[in-house]
Image: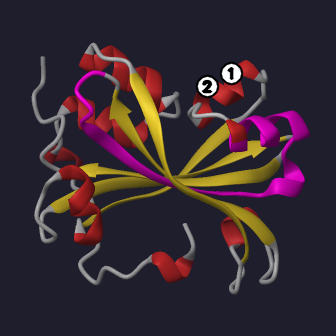
C-alpha cells in the first residue's frame, strides 16, 4: 500500500482475543485467500476489478525496495461471491512489473483471475511475509460493504517474494462484523 493512501487517523493494532477463529486465520495465514474463503463460505469467489493501472510512485516504498520514480502496477479489487454478489474482501496491490514474468503480467491485465490463482497457474514460487495487521474506520470502503464509514475494518498487509526479491505488496480488508461466527 502506498504511504499516501494511509489517511485514517483511527488506526490501531488488532487485539487477537477479540477475533473469531476465522478472522484470525484470514489475518495470519499465508495461504491463498480465495480458496480459504470458498471453503468457509461454500460459495465460489470471483474478483471485481475496481482499477488497475501503471503509475510512477512519488515516494519510495521500502517494503518493495523501490525508490521514488519507480513504475508499479496499482490494482484495487473486490473478492465477491459469485452467487450472492456480496463483497467479502477489498484488496489493493502494488506490483513491481519489472520483477514479474511476462506471461504472468499479461494474464494479470487480461483476466479476472485472483492473484493467488495466477501464482498457482504459473507455478510461481512465492514466499509471503506479513508486515502489519490493523483495525481502522471503513471510510469510503464502507460503500462496497454496505456499512457506515465509521464502522471498523480489519486488514493485513503482506509482501510477496519470488526469487528472493519483493514483487508484490498486498493489503486485504474486510468489515470487523464479517466472519464472526465460529463453527
Report helix, strand or loop for mark 1.
helix
Magenta stretch: give its range: 83-109
Q: What x and y, as percent, mark residue 70?
A: 82, 75
Q: What x and y, as percent, mark residue 95?
A: 71, 55
Q: What x and y, as percent, mark residue 57?
A: 71, 79
Q: Which mark is residue 98?
A: none
Q: Name above or below for residue 38 compared with residue 168.
A: above
Q: Are marks 2 and 1 in contact (CB under 8 Å)?
A: yes
In the image, 29: left or right of 183?
right
Picture colour scheme? secondary structure
The front one of 79 and 182 is: 79
Which residue is depicted at the point 12% across and 63% down? Answer: 151
Quadrant in which the C terminus is drawn: top left
Q: Residues within 10 Å of mark 2 (few under 14, many from 20)?
A: some
Q: Name above or below for residue 108 compared with residue 152.
A: above
* Quarter of the figure with residue 84: top left
Q: Which residue is mark 2?
A: 117
Q: Name above or below for residue 16 compared with residue 86.
A: below
Report helix, strand or loop for mark 2.
helix
Residue 12 in view of the camera:
no
Quadrant in which the N terminus is drawn: bottom right
Q: What x and y, as percent, mark residue 98?
A: 89, 56
Is 154 included in the stretch rendered in magenta? Answer: no
Q: Which residue is mark 1?
A: 120
* Quarter of the figure with residue 55: bottom right
Amino acid at each position: 500500500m502506498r504511504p499516501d493512501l494511509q489517511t485514517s487517523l483511527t488506526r490501531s493494532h488488532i487485539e487477537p482475543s477479540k477475533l473469531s477463529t476465522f478472522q484470525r486465520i484470514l489475518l495470519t495465514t499465508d495461504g491463498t485467500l480465495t480458496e480459504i474463503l470458498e471453503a468457509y463460505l461454500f460459495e465460489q469467489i470471483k474478483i471485481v476489478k475496481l482499477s488497475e493501472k501503471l503509475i510512477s510512485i512519488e515516494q519510495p516504498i521500502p517494503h518493495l525496495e523501490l525508490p521514488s520514480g519507480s513504475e508499479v502496477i496499482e490494482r484495487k479489487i473486490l473478492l465477491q461471491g459469485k452467487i450472492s454478489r456480496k463483497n467479502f474482501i477489498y484488496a489493493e496491490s502494488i506490483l513491481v512489473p519489472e520483477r514479474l514474468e511476462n506471461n504472468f503480467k499479461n494474464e494479470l491485465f487480461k483476466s479476472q483471475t485472483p492473484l493467488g490463482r495466477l501464482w498457482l497457474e504459473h507455478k510461481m514460487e512465492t514466499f509471503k511475509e506479513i508486515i502489519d495487521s490493523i483495525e481502522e474506520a471503513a471510510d469510503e470502503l464502507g460503500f462496497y460493504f454496505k456499512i457506515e464509514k465509521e464502522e471498523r475494518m480489519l486488514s493485513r498487509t503482506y509482501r510477496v517474494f519470488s526469487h528472493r526479491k519483493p514483487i508484490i505488496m498486498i493489503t486485504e480488508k474486510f468489515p470487523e462484523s464479517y466472519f464472526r461466527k465460529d463453527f
